[in-house]
Image (cartoon, grey):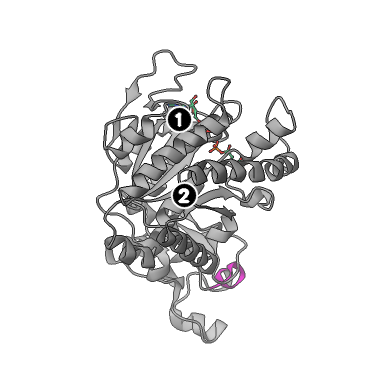
Amino acid sequence: MGSSAASAGAESGLRRVIKVGTSLLRGSPERPTAAVIADLAASFSRQQRQGDRLALVTSGAVGLGCEALRFSKRPTEVVALQAAAAVGQGRLMALYQDAFAVRGLAVAQVLLTRSDLASRRRYQNACRTLEQLLEWGVLPVVNENDTLATDELRFGDNDTLSALVAVAIGADELVLLTDVDRLYSGNPRTDADASPIEEVRDLAELERLSHVAEGGGQWGTGGMTTKLAAARIATSSGIRVRLADGRDPAVLDALFAGEKVGTVFQPSSTPLADRKSWLAHALLVKGSVRVDAGAERALLQQGASLLAVGIRAVEGHFSRRDAVRVLASDGRELGRGLSTLSSEELRQIMGLSSEEVRRRLGAVGDAVVHRDQLVLTCLAS
Ligand SMILES: Nc1ncnc2c1ncn2[C@@H]1O[C@H](COP(=O)(O)OP(=O)(O)O)[C@@H](O)[C@H]1O
Ligand SMILES: N[C@@H](CCC(=O)OP(=O)(O)O)C(=O)O
């Protein structure tokens, strides 16, 4: 995020986002939820004193709601999940408030929906609020606004949300705490031969590993699949990701001390800038445009804007300023960006020269997707 970069420069410590999954926050008879949170508070307060700026992304609203309602398993209907989250979110915050107060730390509830982050104005607003909390030394405790998020606009899991929060605050590191000690070559619960993976060096290696990820347990939602998606978002934005076992109360201190635990995903050496990262990851894509070989060359080799003359097909229904995928003629994704024209307008003018476009549509700019509003996702490494 623009403003965070400047203020982050003056800090002595690191900016870190720690995501705590449902699998941990459900607790166990030996280590109930309150004990998990008390351990987090102890580690957080030590690290804040070292100069780090920390934000927490927490799951657990549905899990704690289900516990309060004495449900034996997670409901599957969205409305029941939303109502359970409404029961659990207040309980979750009360636990954080109490445990962090013991350590002298104030906490702030931040509830976000996917559409908040997909609108640039609301995204920047959220960034500013998070920045203010960090400056005050107050811990943002972020969760998805489960009760309000509509089905098609839900993250559902908090892994993706945590990566976007890490991008939003200009974090150096994203820590994913879960109930498995690291990434394996297969789900260790079902595959006895799965071998541990300690380091994922770049995005190409991450892509090659995508097949190893499976879903999670009874209470977690995304499993390893969404953790790898989160790692892709964060590392392509220059943020190191560490996946570690939150069942171990000493794990955060070890991570903060720089010890090798869990799996580390190294950040890209050519990270996307803030705006491009937002275009690549936060947007809700409404449709796509397919371009010819000449347009593909102009976009990839010259960094040009996309003009109507290179568009061969338009898919979906979208309005001016909506996000679209830019596809090669064979369907490969080249990039994502904001379209200056609606799908209906584009269908009238695709393949036409800029002069002809103006004759038909009046005073519109040459670029259908301006290069400043376009990120070439196919070049990310
Ligand atoms: N390749 C893999 N390596 C490690 N864990 C995996 C893998 N594939 C699937 N998993 C599962 O992912 C689970 C963690 O995800 P999840 O239950 O969603 O946790 P959380 O609630 O912390 O997000 C682990 O318990 C493990 O069973
Ligand atoms: N927002 C939801 C989180 C959903 C969830 O289970 O996420 P995760 O811990 O990533 O599997 C909640 O608070 O229950």
Q: Tag on residue 105?
A: 2
- For this orientation, the residue located farthest to the top is 192
Q: Measured from the top left, where is residue 133 in percent x and y?
A: 46, 60
Name which of mark 1 and mark 2 comes first in the sequence: 2
Q: Is residue 333 above or below residue 218?
A: below
The front one of 192 and 43 is: 43
Q: Amino acid at mark 1?
A: Ala
Q: Measured from the top left, where is residue 168 in percent x and y?
A: 43, 58
Label 1 vs label 2: CA separation?
36 Å
Give the magenta-colored segment's residue range: 341-346
Q: Is residue 108 visible?
A: yes
Q: Tag on residue 213?
A: 1
Determine the residue positioned at 30% across, 48% down: 50
- Figure quarter occupied by ligand 2: top right
> Is most of the magenta stretch helix, strand or loop?
helix
Q: Would you identify the image quadrant in which residue 3 lies?
A: bottom left
Disc 1: CA contacts within 10 A as few (<14), some (14-19) or many (>=20)? some
The front one of 51 and 247 is: 51
